[in-house]
């Protein structure tokens, strides 16, 4: 797995701790949106120091091959993070599967940014799983548009803000990809 990829419109990078302030800016820009769909933040999350520590851990997990979080930039603005795509819970043969998570700045919603090919080709995965809240229509639309298939409901999947939330589970196989 490479630590940097380029698509027609995007740059995807696994970044080092010195980018902590850029990551913090990304999270603060859409704080209300991200917090709506994610668990409560750890104390100190909204500090550069916390982000630097998180990037250090993420970078080491990428070196180990156990988790990959790519920070996404538009080629037209390679200094501003517009999103993240992560692959985690990576299971090698015989399962060859992983989970995916993503978030994008509200200003680039509906731009068609999604990525799965590298997981199939670089990690030799056969299945990607993504879970989403049933009321997160934009995320559901994105998953379905790129070919993810709804498998069912995961009851009490994630505790968010002290409440257990159901999630819909989707999966993607290489044969499901829509070009």
Image (tube, grey):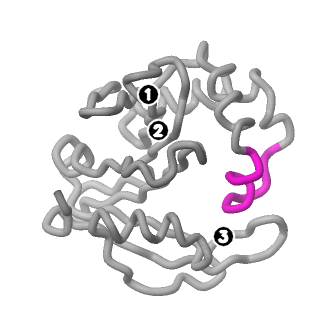
Is 13 a magenta residue?
no
Q: Is residue 1 visible?
A: no
Cα separation, mark 3 vs mark 1, equals: 26 Å
Q: How many marks?
A: 3
Q: Residues within 10 Å of mark 3 (few under 14, many from 20)?
A: some
Taking the image as shown, residue 151 lies to the left or right of residue 44, namely left
> Is any atom of residue 87 visible in this view?
yes
Q: Which residues are magenta?
A: 31-42
Residue appearing at x 86%, y 41% in the figure:
43
Q: Is residue 101 left or right of residue 1?
A: right
Q: Which residue is mark 1?
A: 14
Mark 2 or 1 closer to N-term? 1
Q: Residue drawn 63% across and 80% down? A: 166
Asked whether 44 or 146 is in front, the reply is 146
The residue pinned by badge 2 equals 69
Decide which of 139, 16 is in the foreground and name it. 139
Q: Which residue in the structure is indicated by mark 3?
A: 158
Front-most of residues 137 and 132: 137
Query: Is disc 1 placed on a helix, strand or loop?
Result: loop
The quarter in which the C terminus is drawn is: bottom left
């Amino acid at each position: 797995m490479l630590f940097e990829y380029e698509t027609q419109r995007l740059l995807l990078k696994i970044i080092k701790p010195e980018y902590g302030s850029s990551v913090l800016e990304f999270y603060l820009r859409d704080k209300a949106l991200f917090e709506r769909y994610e668990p409560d933040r750890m104390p100190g999350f909204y500090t550069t120091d916390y982000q630097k520590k998180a990037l250090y851990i993420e970078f080491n997990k990428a070196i180990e091959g156990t988790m990959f979080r790519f920070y996404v930039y538009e080629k037209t603005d390679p200094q501003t993070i517009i999103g993240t795509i992560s692959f985690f819970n990576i299971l090698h043969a015989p399962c060859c599967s992983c989970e995916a998570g993503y978030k994008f700045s509200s200003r680039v919603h509906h731009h068609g940014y999604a990525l799965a090919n590298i997981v199939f080709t670089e990690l030799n995965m056969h299945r990607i799983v993504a879970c989403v809240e049933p009321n997160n229509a934009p995320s559901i639309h994105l998953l379905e548009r790129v070919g993810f298939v709804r498998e069912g409901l995961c009851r009490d999947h994630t505790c968010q803000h002290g409440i257990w939330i159901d999630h819909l589970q989707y999966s993607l196989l290489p044969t499901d990809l829509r070009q």
